[in-house]
Structure formats: C-alpha cells, structure tokens
Amino acid sequence: MQMKASTYGAIGAALVWSLLAIGPAISGERGPNTRRAVPAGFSEASSEASSGVNPAAHQSMLHGSSPLAIEQLEQLALANNPTLCLAARRVQALRGKQQQVGLYPNPVVGYIGEEVGNEGHTGQHGIWIGQQVVTANKLAWNRSVAGSEIAAAQYEWAMQRLRVVNDVHAAAYEVIAAQQTVELSEELLRVAEAGLQAAEQLLAGEEVNRIDVLEARVEVTSTRLALKKAHVALTECWRRLATLTGVPDMPQTPVAEPEDKRLDGPIAWEAALNQLISESPERMRAIAAVDQARAAVGRECAGRVPDVELEAGVRYNFGSDSTLATMGFALPLQLFDRNQGNIYRAQAELAAAHQELRRVELLLQQKLAQEFRQYDDARETVTQYRDAMLPEVNEALQVARTGYQQGEFGYLELLTVQRTYFETHLAFVDAVREARVSRVRIEGLLLTGGLERPGPLE
C-alpha cells in the first residue's frame, strides 16, 4: 500500500511539472518588439525626483538676499511642481499594467473523487491540474499594446515638463515687467514731487498762479496711487510664479533680468516649424498612439486563434488497488465568434489614430503661425520704441522740466510730457514682456499649462 501511494505521488508530480512546462512551450510567446524610444530627459530617476521635494532643501535659494535667476526658479519648479509627479506616476502605473497583461495564466489544481461507496468500496480518489495555453503570441501583443501606452505617457511627461518650464519662464518675465513698472512709477513720483516743489517755488515768486500748485498736488497724489497699484500687481505676479514652482509661500524676492540679447534677431519660420514638427512631444505622443492602435489590431487578429485548455490527472482506485492517469484537452470551435467585431473596431481605431496624428500636426502649425505673428509684432514694437521713441520722450521730459523751472512752459505742458513719458516707457516694458513670452512659447514648442493635470491615472 505504501508502494502504491508513493508511485501515485510520483506520477502526480511528474504530470504537474510536465503540464506547467508544456503550456508556455506550445504557445511560443515571442511576439513583436515592445521597446520604445524614451523622451529626452526621462528616466526612472527623473520619475523619483519628480515625486515632490521638501522646499527646505532650497532654503539658501529662497531666503537669499540676491535676486533669483530664472534658471533657479526653473529648477525649483522641476523639483516641486506636483504635475510632474502625476505624469511620472502614470508611467510607473502603466509599467505595472504592462507586466500584468503579459503574465501567463495560472494553472488550476483540483481534487476528484468517483464511485465513492460503490459496493462498499472507498472508490477512486485523485488530483488533476489544468493549464490554459495562450496561442498566437497574444501575451506578447498585450505587452506591445501596453508598451505603446507607456511611450505615450512618457511623452505626456515630457510635455508637462515643457509646460512647467515655459510657464515659469513666462511668469518670471511677468514679474520682471511688474518690477520695471514699479521702478517707472517711483521715477514718475519723483518727477511729480519735483514738479510740485518747482510750482511752489514759482508761486512764491509770483511767477505762476495757485492753479499750477493744485494741479501739481493732484498729480503727485495720482502718481502715488499708481505706484501702490504697481506694487499690488507685482505681488500678484509673484504669487502666480510661486505657485508654479510648487512653493506658494516662497517669500517675495526680486527676479534678475536675463542678459540675453535674443530679442535683437528674428526667428526663422522654417527653422521654428522644423523644430516643432521634429521635437514636439505632443506629436510624438500622437505617434505612440498610432503604434498602440497598430499593436491593438495585431492583438485582435491573434484573438481569432483560440486558446487550448490542457488537463492531466492521476487517480488511485482503492477497489482494484490500481493507479490511473487521465489526460485531455479542449479547443473552442470558431464557428460564430471569430473576433471579427473586435478586429473591425481596432482597424477603425487605427485609421482614427492616423487622422489624429495629422490633426495634431496641422494644429501645431496653426498655433505656431499665431504665436509667430505675435512675436514679430512685439519685437518690431520693441525695436521702434527702443531706437526712436524712448530717446525722444526722454529728451522731451528733460526739456519740459528745465523750461518749466525757467518759466518757459506752463504746468499743463509739463504734465502732458510727464504722462507721455510714463505711458511710452510702460508700453515699451509691455512690448518687451510680450516678445519674451512669445519667444518662450515658440522655443518651448507651444506648450503651456504648468498646473493642469497631465492625464488621468488609469
């Protein structure tokens, strides 16, 4: 009896291991290549680095007395902006999905008992094991589909990184323009106060009437109000910049104006268009979607081949004192369902993915044309103000101030020149800001939205 039991166990173990080995061997899972190009700058290390860094690591930067460079603000945002963590976690989640959909089905083990109690015997008792054999490289196709989805998510991460960088640069230029507006308002206040002092002196010498003094006082009050508004606007611009960096409570610090001279030269349309088409992660994401749809077609076509169910078992018949082995397989007959509906759907989705790629390319060109016009207009405005208008209004203000003090001009003429001076310089600051922001968008591949959710976590 012990010999029979040991033989029974040995045969059962042999059947189990044989069936576990034969399943994957029959299926021959090799399938398509699932390797995809990784966007520049993306790595598992970058994913971890984007998981949110304690701002305490940047205390020396945040509490320094010197102005912050735009590059410092960029690094701060890349370390703390939560949208980069979201995009990186999505890639990691899809890696888990790719691993799961490529796993081989687990075998099934069961117990079987027959003829129990028949003619007073204990009957037959045994174990069986079943294994689903996946055919037609379905698991490899599953991994290929998930691999393309990972590639799309990686390009989404690259897009979000550019969104953050572009928005930080644009917001920094907004802060710089607000700082310059404050400086202009302070200068205009000094000019207005000097005008009031000159008016009071002229009134004391009975060279002007009291109306000039009253107008000068009103101008000083108005200029002080404009200065307060400029400070409020600067604070608002700084807060928007701080939220983009992921450190909203960062103390307000001056932003250093860059020393670049890039606004002096135009951007070539062909060069900008070629860079956009060749480097845009938005377009690369659309290409990855085409690859995913193509792999999905292959997966659905593989679904026409049915999987095979193998089963093997061993029993011991206590009545006849014998060991029995059983084997079997099951194969679905593809009479009605040959996966034709899913194949048709996948082919339609592949055609739609190609059209989506074309739509993205056309949309990028349309956006570039709009941004290109804005940049050219702003750059031309900057050139005209810098080379012609600013020198003239500077000279006009100096002449008007000297002439008023000498009694050659009335206060109304001086006031008109002061306001023209202020408005012209403000227009110049705004044109420089607009040109810089437009250039950031063009060189940043037209991506904005540094705090928008990069994509749903599936």
Image: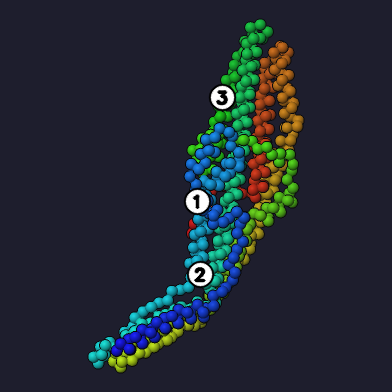
Q: CA distance from mark 2 to mark 1?
A: 27 Å
Residue 204 percent location from the top left of the image: 63, 7
Between tags 2 and 1, which lies in front?
1
Looking at the picture, tell me which residue is in the foreground, 194 or 205: 194
- Reply above or below: 124 against 419: below
Mark 3 or mark 1: which comes first in sequence?
A: 1
Q: Residue at x 51, y 79 (%)?
A: 25
Mark 3 lies on a secondary structure that is helix
Q: Is residue 270 above or below residue 185?
A: below
Q: CA distance from mark 3 to mark 2?
A: 68 Å
Q: Is 340 rendered above or below residue 7? A: above
For the point 67% across and 47% down, the residue is 442
**On the image, numbered disc 2 is attached to which residue?**
102
- Evaluate whether residue 347 shows in this view: no
Residue in the picture at 53% in, 38% down: 60
Q: Position of residue 111 (x, y in %)?
A: 34, 81
Location of mark 3 (residue): 225
Give the CA separation, mark 3 to mark 1. 44 Å
Q: Mark 1: which amino acid?
A: Ser
Callout in the foreground (3, 1) = 1
Q: Residue furthest left?
A: 120
Q: Which structural element holds mark 2? A: loop
Disc 3 residue type?
Leu
User: Residue most toward the right?
Assistant: 388
